[in-house]
Image: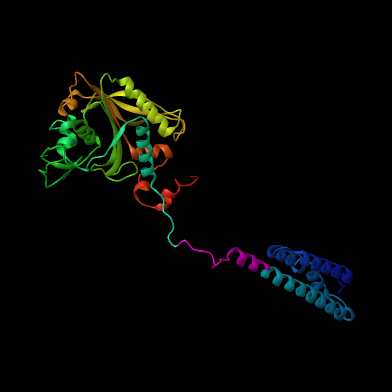
Amino acid sequence: MAEVEFDPAAVTDEVSEGIGEIREASDLEELKALKSRYSGAGSAMARASRAIGSLSADRKKTAGQLIGKLRADFGRAYGLKEGQLQQEEEDRRLRAERVDMTLPVDRKPQGARHPLTRLMEDVEDFFVSMGWRIAQGPELEAEWYNFDALNFGPDHPARQMQDTFYVKGNQARDAAGFVGSNMVMRTHTSPDQARSLITRGVPLYVACTGRVFRTDELDATHTPVFHQCEAIAVDEHLTMADLKGVLDKLAAAMFGPEARTRLRPSYFPFTEPSAEMDLWFPDRKGGPGWIEWGGCGMVNPNVLRSAGVDPDKYSGFAFGVGMERTLLLRHDINDMHDLVEGDVRFSQQFEMGE
């Protein structure tokens, strides 16, 4: 059998080169690649080992001893470097996971104020800055204040059970001396406007904020318990122009100086004329554009009469906006569930940067 070429110097030089590169390896992945290169099936040592079988008898022993020594040298260098790199990797991991047990621990982590609470305070601050007063009435309300005083007829759909929570146990006299025929969970904050007209008189500039109740199912855009801000101004010579001015100032305070409003004809029992209020602001999801924000109008003369105010002498305007809707628009929130589930991580997002 013809001898296969066997070059001891070449294989020795390649193994020496591999040992040198092993000593310079910086991580385990690089080390594994060097092992495959210098001792794998295609390496000089592997080719030399396959060639030994074809050598003459007098060369086999010397060649075998050389390959054995080279493999041992290479394996020893590899093992030492592998152990060193593994130890360094473990040390890095331990340093990264180290915990200083002497540091003080906040066992009672701080919570965060709900963004809806913060928003309602911003709205109240806006009205106070204009010299208006803030009114907050009872959530369990007499039906007269919730409907009759606001010009809702006895057959109005809003009185039906599918819209309103009625409460048994009534006939209680309230602070104004009125005995209600029924008690309801208020469906809007407008009863506070009627109470203010009766108890405070005119001229009147009042904003009413608070929680209201309707028989809605909880979904991404509705909730049976939500918050409103309604405002009423009654004085001599007030017009729709005054209403529009206040609405534009409120929009700018809530959504930035470029925000503005527009009015579309509509109908509400407690205002005449009535309008739907649309809002425009530049940072709205999907780009600038108009979106419905609330309702408004001039106070219906019947509402003034029910509170003992002369509609021939006084006029007024009123409007209302939903606080949840304002918050959703202001912060680009997509799901009402985020506001009601009580996850502190949701509220903490609004504490950042303050």
Q: Which residues are magenta?
A: 88-106
State the residue at coordinates (46%, 33%).
283
- Image quarter for residue 247? top left
User: Is residue 315 left or right of 72 when viewed as pictured?
Assistant: left
Whether residue 53 is visible, yes or no, is: no
Whether residue 60 is visible, yes or no, is: yes
| Residue in front for this viewpoint, 300 or 311 | 311
Q: How many numbered marks have been drawn onto this rendered protein structure?
A: 0
For residue 300, above or below residue 349: above
Q: Position of residue 213 (x, y in %)?
A: 24, 42
- Image quarter for residue 295? top left
State the residue at coordinates (41%, 50%).
112
| Residue in front for this viewpoint, 240 or 73 | 240
Residue 98 counted in the magenta span:
yes
State the residue at coordinates (17%, 35%).
145
| Residue in front for this viewpoint, 349 or 70 | 349
User: Is residue 21 left or right of 145 when viewed as pictured?
Assistant: right
Residue 241 counted in the magenta span:
no
Q: Position of residue 226 (x, y in %)?
A: 29, 42
